[in-house]
Amino acid sequence: MKLRTTNKVKAEAGMASMTDLVFLLLVFFIIMSTLSEPQTPLDLPEAEQGIPNSLTPRPEIAVGVNPDNTYFVTSGNSVFEDMSYEEAREVLLAEMANSDDRKLKIAGDKEASYEAVFKLISLCQAENWSPLLAYDKNSKR
């Protein structure tokens, strides 16, 4: 009497799903290893023991251009408004002569012409001043 069956159950696991899992893990670890390294080395400056950033002195003299291409100059507590370029140039030369700071803050309205702002920048270059360009999107001036 023969009791053995010819249909035997195979105990092998499918290798297709195992190779898929290995490739997914490989891709995951490659991506994670590239993200963990800093791509660009940063050389950050050291903090000085001097003046805090909030107390850094700002330029004393500022000039701005209105939408109608007129100029206004602020120096300390004095404000000169609605001037032509020639008038603003004379005021700036007088104010900068009295100032130790060689920096001039330039603020232009977004509706002002480029020429009006570039005149101020060229004046700074001619007089060897340092122009600081300012932009404030919420500004009314």
Image: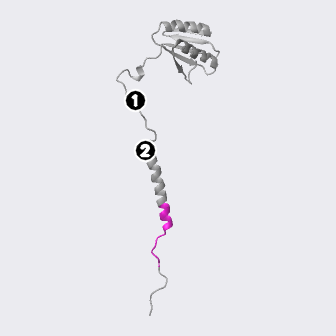
Amino acid on which the number 1 mark rests in the picture: Pro
Amino acid on which the number 2 mark rests in the picture: Glu
Residue 4 lies, with reference to residue 27, above or below; the image says below
Which residues fall within the magenta stretch?
Answer: 9-21
User: Label 1: which residue?
Assistant: 45
Inter-mark Cα distance, 1 to 2: 21 Å
Residue 115 lies, with reference to residue 4, above or below; the image says above
| Residue 112 seen in the current view | no
Q: Residue 110's quadrant in the figure?
A: top right
Nearest the eye: 110 or 140: 110
Q: Position of residue 12 (x, y in %)?
A: 46, 73
User: Label 2: which residue?
Assistant: 37
Residue 44 lies, with reference to residue 61, above or below; the image says below
> Is residue 136 on the magenta stretch?
no
* Quadrant into which the N terminus falls: bottom left
Badge 1 crowding class, 10 Å Cα cut-off, few under 14, some 14 to 19, many 20 or more, is few
Residue positioned 43% across, 38% down in the render? 41
Kindly state the secondary structure of the residue where label 2 is placed.
Answer: loop
